[in-house]
Image (cartoon, rainbow, N blue to C red):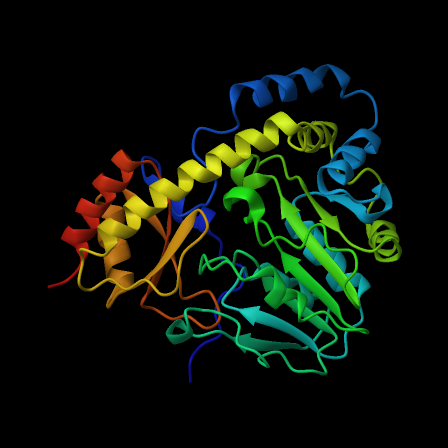
Amino acid sequence: MNAEPDLRHHGDAEVRSAGLVDLAVNVRTGTPPPWLRDRLAATLDTLAAYPDGTAARAAVAARHGRPVAEVLLTAGAAEAFVLLARVLRPRHAVVVHPQFTEPEAALRDAGHVVHRVLLTPEQGFRLPPGAVPENADLVVVGNPTNPTSILHPAAALAELARPGRTLVVDEAFMDTDPGETESLAGARDLPGRVVVLRSLTKTWGLAGLRIGYLLAPAGLVAELAAAQPLWPVSTPALVAAELCSAPAALAEADAAARATALDREHLLKGLATLPAVRVYGDPAASFVLIRLPGAAAVRDRLRAAGFAVRRGDTFPGLGPDWLRLAVRDRDTTDRFLDALAAAVPG
């Protein structure tokens, strides 16, 4: 009988050894950019005052064309998963895997029974029609999905919306898709309750600051806000949310997404030269999921060669033959591909 995957294992555990080149964590390198770092440093002079999220909520609302009452700022997207798990009372909760494990972990911690829908590599990790049970009143799905890097069509996810159902779409990596073509962040007319989660961690290099937000109907936002502690988001994090929602920042993020797409294609071309390595589906985010025999031993050899990659066996639906690779610049990728070729058996 297979052991349950460790839902609390995250990529940062792979890079705690000094000197490793990080392909395990999906945070864009070279971030935060100097202009953002300088503005955040300037907030130190205001820390005697309690945080005020008014301007940040307004900026996020304007960025997505939604009323302020439909925006909830959180200490990273991970806090939103915990709030949802504590506030919602689902009778039949479904999490679509493989995906980020924190939503399921939060639901289980809150005492909910979680049912899994497992997408398969043979189908390119796409969600087939009818895969989600009709009686599910809570459905959680990622888009683009971590770790598969698959971008689901917005129309396909919108079809999951139902009266009496809460549909939660984790769009933490949506800003790695140029133009955010398949986002549901602006969808306000779907049946049931649609919740979209966003993170500013990945593109802007703010994992240590903890800032994200949630978009949802105003009534649900009010319920979730009531479950937060007072002043849940710090002043520097609020400033980050405001600045990163501005038009200039959005243009910079889109340019970064287009550069990442080119770097991802370079990585995929290199992986295609290794007969033992398989990529399923059409990767669309800032990382790529690969399958190869003996991945655990390959991961150890890569560490010895100076590269940290993310193990895949902690994601439900995957196993010991999977690794997740963050997309990096071409020089780093070329050095990594040489190390991977040397590490792959045979």
Residue occupying image coordinates x 83% and y 56%: 217
Residue occupying image coordinates x 61% and y 25%: 248
Q: In this view, does 74 lie to the left or right of 250?
A: right
Q: Position of residue 269 (x, y in %)?
A: 25, 50
Q: Where is residue 12 in the image (x, y as percent from the top left)?
A: 46, 46
Residue occupying image coordinates x 64% and y 51%: 78
Q: Where is residue 32 in the image (x, y as percent from the top left)?
A: 53, 28
Q: In this view, does 232 lie to the left or right of 94?
A: right
Q: Where is residue 301 in the image (x, y as percent from the top left)?
A: 22, 52
- Quick one: which residue is furthest to the bottom in this view? 1
Q: Dividing the picture into quarters, in which one does residue 143 lie? A: bottom right
Say above or below: 337 vs 158: above
Q: In this view, does 142 lie to the left or right of 223?
A: left
Between 278 and 265, the one nearer to me in the picture:
265
Q: Can residue 205 be seen in this view?
A: no
Where, quadrant-wise, is the N terminus in this rendering?
A: bottom left
